[in-house]
Image (cartoon, grey):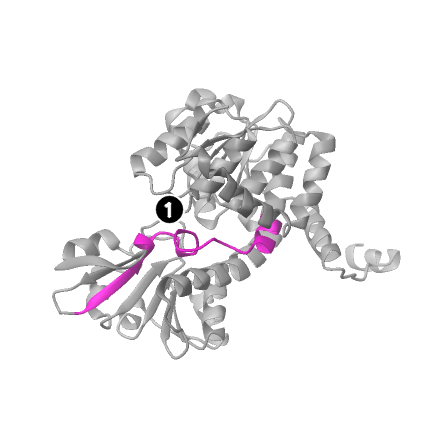
Amino acid sequence: MESHIRDINLWESGELKLSWVRSHMPLLEGIEKDFRKDKPFEGLKIALSVHLEAKTAHLCEVLAAGGADMYITGSNPLSTQDDVAAALVHEGLNVFAIHGCTEKEYFADIRRVLEVGPNIIIDDGGDLVTTLHNDFPELVPGVIGGCEETTTGILRLKAMAAAGRLKFPMMLVNDADCKHLFDNRYGTGQSVWDGINRTTNLIVAGKNVVVAGYGWCGKGVAMRAKGLGAEVIVTEVDPVKAMEAVMDGFKVMPMLEASALGDIFVTVTGCKDVITPECFLRMKDGAICCNAGHFDVEVAVAALRKMAVSHRPARNNIEAYKLENGRTVYIIAEGRLVNLAAGDGHPAEIMDMSFAIQALSARYLAEHRGSIGSLLNNVPEEIDREVALRKLKDWNIRIDTLSEEQHKYIYG
């Protein structure tokens, strides 16, 4: 066993968190029973880089139950929970992650989980896959394939594939229906506002909320803001998504125009420089900015720091930046993922579905090693269907099935 964590003595607190999510993740419970019996990962090493909190830790337990030798790190320095990392080490898993580490330390831990020569990679944002290709090309032949959790990570994979740099097959977990339709929309929608509300302790009702990006995550954030009583403004670069936002009842305008109107700004684009210095100068005194995209580049915090005449802590996890025009702009969680850096992430029941897709996709890779011809692979429909049926069964909901004649009528 190897580890690089803050303090093993924190394990009891982490185990309490793990115990809670285990009791609210029935899909993973069922999959764990199957894995214990079948051992699909016997003799395989799995390197995992996902936001290291209790729900992710339970996924690691499930994969380990399937025979995997787990090497675990976080995918964001501020989302790692030190007590959860300690709990996993106490169980005998290999963990390399510390909350609040520097960027240098973060990538050192990424490299530690890759140095072992993993056979399967489970990634969240693409740092594992990118670092493996860049720094450990000699280990590529030993990789069966990997799974990517996020929109941002899939964009990076597509760019690598287009440039001829991707060398092993990846499962596009984020594109599975039982992931993005629920995790991205309902999970992000709830967890973003959990993070904002617990950090600011301010009311949302009556405020103007600006949501940058109207993909599935943006839809969820906007929907929940509306439910909390806010007036919602959406900014977009995609004309079709902008039309969706209009027909969903939201105002749509460029960010520069919206920056003068918003009270709370949430970026959910996967792009960089969405809120720029010009936007900051237009903002109301007391405007609050945060990010729900994977990387901390959507709100231009570094530029804000340079242009501010002063900055100070305003509250735990909130920085106040005073501008030359006398106004103050607040940034939550340094512009990192607000739902994890300022909260506990998505609800356990939501991540139960997402991590069920991850676990079953990893099993698919193990079972089809050497026979997956494509580099970018959608999650097979039967996995999506299996997860949906398991979830409906858990809810005690039954649905109709096609008769043989109906099946022939539709499918021929």
Apparent side of residue 248 relative to residue 406 in the rendered image (left or right): left
> Vertical placement of 106 versus 306: above or below?
above
Q: Residue at the location (48% across, 53% down)?
A: 345
Residue 30 inside the magenta-drawn segment: no
Percent of width and height locating residue 311: 18, 58
State the image quarter where residue 162 is shown.
Answer: top left
Judging depth in this view, the residue of 33 and 376 nearest the camera is: 33
Percent of width and height locating residue 175: 55, 50
- Which residue is tagged 1? 78
Q: Using the rendered image of the protein, determine whether residue 126 is visible from the camera's viewpoint.
A: yes
Q: Residue at the location (72% across, 38% down)?
A: 33
> Vertical placement of 138 versus 247: above or below?
above
Apparent side of residue 11 relative to residue 341 in the rendered image (left or right): right
> Vertical placement of 1 versus 390: above or below?
above
Mark 1 crowdedness (10 Å alpha carbons): few <14, some 14-19, many ≥20: many
State the image quarter where residue 320 is shown.
Answer: bottom left
The stretch of residues the image draws in magenta is: 327-354
- Specify the amino acid type for callout 1: Leu
Percent of width and height locating residue 313: 24, 57
Q: Residue at the location (51% across, 55% down)?
A: 346
